[in-house]
Image (cartoon, grey):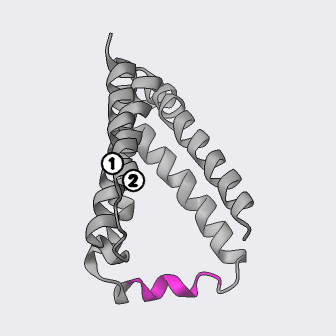
Amino acid sequence: MSRVLAIVLTAAAGGFVGMQAPINARLGRQVGSLQAATVSFLIGTAALLLIAAVSSGGLTGIGHANRAPWWALLGGLLGAFYVVVALITVRTLGVSSLTAIVVAAQLAIAVAIDRFGLLGIAKQHIAAPRIVGLVLLVVGAVLVVRR
């Protein structure tokens, strides 16, 4: 995959994540917060099963999940936590504040994961520009969240 395509797809995914909380919150007003999160994950699961079924390798690889370290199976749980928290807090924070906090927290944990080589990721040198970027992002998040 080209770097440009990777950037475009990642930007699209980021935009979709920004839309996810208000969409789920609207569904939550209809069916309840936890029920909305459940519906969201059921639809996502169905889509992933369909995509995996038609992709190379099909669904056979799912049976090998037990070979992964225990912590590698937490992604779905972390995703569920995010969806439920975002669905509930977007009404209080608004989409921009929710997104600012999430992005700042994502970058902070990403820098720590890179620096210490956590979760099976190779260690990366963290130079001053990255730290400055993280600080600026946190300051930006504070400015967005602040009333």
Q: Amino acid at mark 2?
A: Gly
In the picture shown, does residue 5 fall above or below 36? Answer: below
The residue to which callout 2 is attached is 79
- Cβ–Cβ under 8 Å for marks 1 and 2: no
Residue for point 50% across, 28% down: 22
Question: Which badge, 1 or 2, is on the more N-terminal residue?
Answer: 2
- Quarter location, residue 28: top left
In the picture shown, does residue 22 fall above or below 105? Answer: above
Crowding at dot 2, Cα within 10 Å, few <14 / some 14-19 / many 20+, comes out as few
Residues drawn in magenta: 58-65
Asked whether 117 falls inside the magenta stretch, the response is no
Q: Nearer the viewer, residue 48 or 101?
A: 101
The residue to which callout 1 is attached is 131
Q: Position of residue 122 (x, y in %)?
A: 37, 77
Is residue 32 in view? no
Q: Position of residue 67 (x, y in %)?
A: 36, 90
Residue for point 34% across, 61% down: 126
Residue positioned most to the front = 128
**Quick check: 2 left or right of 61?**
right
Residue for point 46% across, 25% down: 95
Q: Amino acid at mark 1?
A: Ile
Q: Position of residue 81 (x, y in %)?
A: 32, 48
In the picture shown, does residue 6 fall above or below 108? Answer: below
Residue for point 26% across, 78% down: 70
Residue positioned most to the top = 147
Tag 2 secondary structure:
helix
Tag 1 secondary structure:
helix
Is residue 61 in view? yes
Q: Quadrant of the N terminus?
A: bottom right
Asked whether 62 falls inside the magenta stretch, the response is yes
Type of secondary structure dominating the magenta stretch: helix
